[in-house]
Image (cartoon, rainbow, N blue to C red):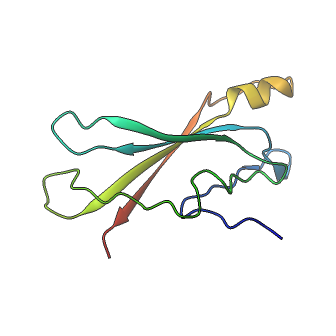
Amino acid sequence: MSKQSGPITCHVLDSSRGIPGKNIEVQLEQLEPGEEKRWNAVSRAITNEDGRCPSLVPSDYKIKIDYYDDDNTAKALYRITFYTAPYFKALNQKSFYPFVQVFSDFPDN
């Protein structure tokens, strides 16, 4: 029986080789509201054999909706960082991007 994924997951594909990107470190952060607008770590994980992080957050994780900008709209902004340099180093390949960041905006609906 498969374990249920949390509301935030990821899937890494190595398009240069046509296979999943396995064993890549992933960090999830959320932008906190306020004048400083700091990124706070939520979790870290390593991609599995299929290039996925199904347990990046627990299945009961609640996305924290906060005001993070001046438009008075309740939102949550998350950043996922994929540390790709070690992955390519293990393959004896040069990495053009030492890491890749993806931002996701979750509105309060």
Residue 32 in which image quadrant: top left
Q: Position of residue 77 (x, y in %)?
A: 36, 52
* Residue at 41% in and 60% down: 63
Q: In this view, does 86 lie above or below 25?
A: above
* Residue at 66% in and 53% down: 55
Q: How many marks?
A: 0
Q: Position of residue 16 (x, y in %)?
A: 80, 44
Q: Position of residue 37 (x, y in %)?
A: 25, 38
* Residue at 78% in and 29% down: 88
Between 56 and 22, the one lying in front of the other is 56
* Residue at 61% in and 57% down: 9
Q: Is residue 9 above or below residue 98?
A: below
**Which quadrant is home to the C terminus?**
bottom left
Q: In this view, does 105 lie above or below 90?
A: below
**Which quadrant is home to the N terminus?**
bottom right
Residue 81 in which image quadrant: top right
Residue 39 in which image quadrant: top left
Extreme-bottom residue of the structure: 109
Left or right, 10 with respect to 30, comes to right
Left or right, 52 with respect to 35, comes to right
